[in-house]
Image: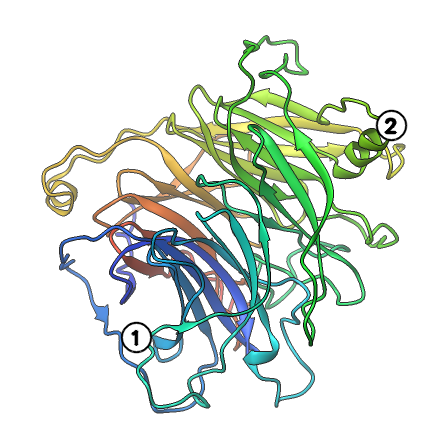
């Protein structure tokens, strides 16, 4: 019998659904960003240590975590004192905050110890059809004595309209270059060098459409909004797989875009930094596609109807989430069918950067899982039956673990590498659907997260799990 699952440390104080998580760095310290959507709930008293929502008068935190939630707030938690550093109203309570991340042109570290978090910018998305960039508030060490439970309005530098009002979260391009698991890195977001353009992708107003955007510099002063690089629109349903197995093509199309993830560039050649990297998109019909935004942009100029580099219907129900690994050598998808699928991604070495040839191979698939029905889980769910589905997936930076946010309130941890599926842990705490998962860094240094896993849920809590820690190894 395996070892029992660790007890999580819980961050509470949202009072509504927590929808997203993203590790970042503010004040030269690690942070976690998250968002929520308004849905009043009854009080939940989980059998676990809860961290009270009160500020610390002590030193500025060495690690913070930003949590965005369903009343439109973004909360930054100091993970050293495990108390909130600041709270900002990024979007209206009626729309909530759906996704949040550090702006990629904001430096994750600084050579000056005097760098303030106010110099950093944050990207957030609401269900009001907007994508915003705003300045992060100062840390609690220099803030006023007012309680951080009182949200302050976000200091927006620009606001862009996406025209999409559903639950697809935006994606931000990762850094170009090596893309490997370097020490102390936060793999939820690795900033691009300020001299290079940074990119984001968001669901478009058109069904099955994705807008790829070039973001303005977030360093100092007022700036205009993002510019459209290209629009990617899936025409029709899934095509036949490359191995010859047939999948059903749907005349109605692939449906709405459900999830997006950029694929980090590989190798040391950064001559292509000015162009957006490849993009993975998951669709309502179960299809997952790999797009080259550069090829699509060229096709738009010539009025051609360009297709993705690869696509296949990998889920029997909606493909709800997708995440690329830090090396750009593979990715993972999750679906409403309860399956988690791992793929390897290879490119023709002879292909030019303008016309890449991608080979996608499924390594293994987990599930569909059976929703947990033990007595403790039933008690947390108030006797209700839990559904089988996956809300979010995340790959740890060293490429060893995959975490899946499941509809039955569990966080399931799988082995990422290997040709056969292997379930490593099933973590139980949340009393409602788990909406988001994220890993911290795995460098093992003093200022590293040791691979800690964070999970967010509709129960209004964020749990920090010390699963398979790497610090000191």
According to the picture, the residue beneath numbered tag 2 turns out to be 302
Q: Position of residue 287 (x, y in %)?
A: 55, 24
Q: Position of residue 430 (x, y in %)?
A: 24, 50
**Lateral position of residue 116 relative to residue 10, left or right:** right
Task: Identify the element where label 1 is drawn.
Answer: loop
According to the picture, the residue beneath numbered tag 1 turns out to be 149
**Lateral position of residue 109 relative to residue 62, left or right:** right
Q: Nearer the viewer, residue 50 or 149?
A: 149
Q: Which badge, 1 or 2, comes first in the chain's sequence?
A: 1
Image position of 414 with respect to 274: above or below: above
**Image quadrant of residue 296?**
top right
Task: Identify the element where label 2 is drawn.
Answer: loop
Residue at point 66%, 39% (across, down): 279
Q: Can the viewer see residue 78?
A: no
Q: Can the viewer see residue 387?
A: yes
Residue at point 85%, 50% (across, down): 272
Q: Position of residue 65 (x, y in %)?
A: 43, 68
């Amino acid at each position: 019998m395996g070892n029992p699952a660790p007890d999580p440390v819980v961050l509470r104080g949202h009072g509504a659904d927590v929808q997203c998580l993203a590790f970042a760095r503010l004040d030269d310290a690690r942070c976690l960003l998250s968002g929520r959507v308004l849905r009043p709930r009854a009080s939940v008293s989980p059998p676990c240590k809860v961290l009270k929502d009160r500020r610390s008068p002590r030193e500025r935190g060495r690690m913070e975590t930003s949590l965005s939630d369903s009343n439109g707030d973004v909360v930054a938690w100091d993970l050293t004192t495990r108390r909130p550093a600041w709270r900002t109203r990024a979007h209206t309570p009626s729309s909530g905050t759906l996704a949040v991340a550090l702006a990629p042109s904001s430096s994750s570290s600084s050579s000056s110890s005097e760098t303030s978090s106010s110099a950093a910018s944050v990207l957030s998305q609401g269900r009001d059809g907007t994508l915003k960039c705003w300045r992060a508030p100062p840390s609690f060490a220099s803030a006023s004595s007012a309680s951080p439970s009182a949200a302050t309005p976000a200091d927006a530098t620009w606001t862009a309209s996406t025209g999409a009002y559903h639950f697809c979260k935006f994606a931000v391009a990762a850094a170009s270059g090596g893309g490997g698991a370097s020490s102390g890195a936060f793999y939820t977001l690795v900033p691009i060098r300020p001299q290079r353009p940074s990119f984001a992708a968001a669901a478009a107003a058109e069904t099955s459409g994705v807008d790829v955007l070039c973001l303005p510099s977030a360093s100092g002063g007022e700036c205009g909004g993002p510019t459209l690089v290209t629009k990617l629109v899936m025409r029709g349903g899934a095509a036949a797989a490359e191995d010859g197995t047939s999948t059903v093509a749907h005349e109605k199309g692939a449906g709405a875009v459900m999830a997006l993830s950029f694929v980090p560039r590989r190798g040391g050649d950064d001559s292509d930094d000015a162009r957006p990297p490849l993009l993975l998109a998951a669709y309502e019909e179960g299809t997952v596609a790999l797009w080259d935004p550069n090829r699509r942009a060229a096709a738009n100029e010539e009025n051609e109807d360009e297709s993705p580099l690869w696509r296949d219907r990998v889920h029997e129900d909606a493909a709800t989430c997708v995440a690329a690994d830090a090396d750009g050598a593979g990715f993972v998808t999750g679906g409403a069918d309860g399956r988690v699928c791992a793929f390897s991604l290879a490119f023709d070495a002879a292909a030019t950067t303008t016309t890449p040839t991608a080979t996608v191979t499924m390594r293994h698939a987990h599930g569909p899982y059976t929703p947990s029905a033990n007595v403790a889980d039933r008690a947390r769910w108030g006797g209700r039956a839990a559904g089988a589905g996956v809300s979010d997936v995340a790959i740890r930076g060293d490429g060893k673990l995959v975490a899946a946010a499941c509809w039955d309130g569990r966080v399931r941890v799988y082995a990422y590498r290997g040709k056969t599926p292997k379930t490593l842990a099933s973590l139980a705490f949340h009393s409602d659907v788990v909406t988001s998962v994220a890993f911290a860094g795995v460098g093992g240094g003093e200022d590293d997260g040791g691979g800690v896993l964070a999970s967010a849920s509709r129960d209004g809590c964020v749990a920090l799990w010390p699963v398979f820690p790497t610090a000191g190894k």
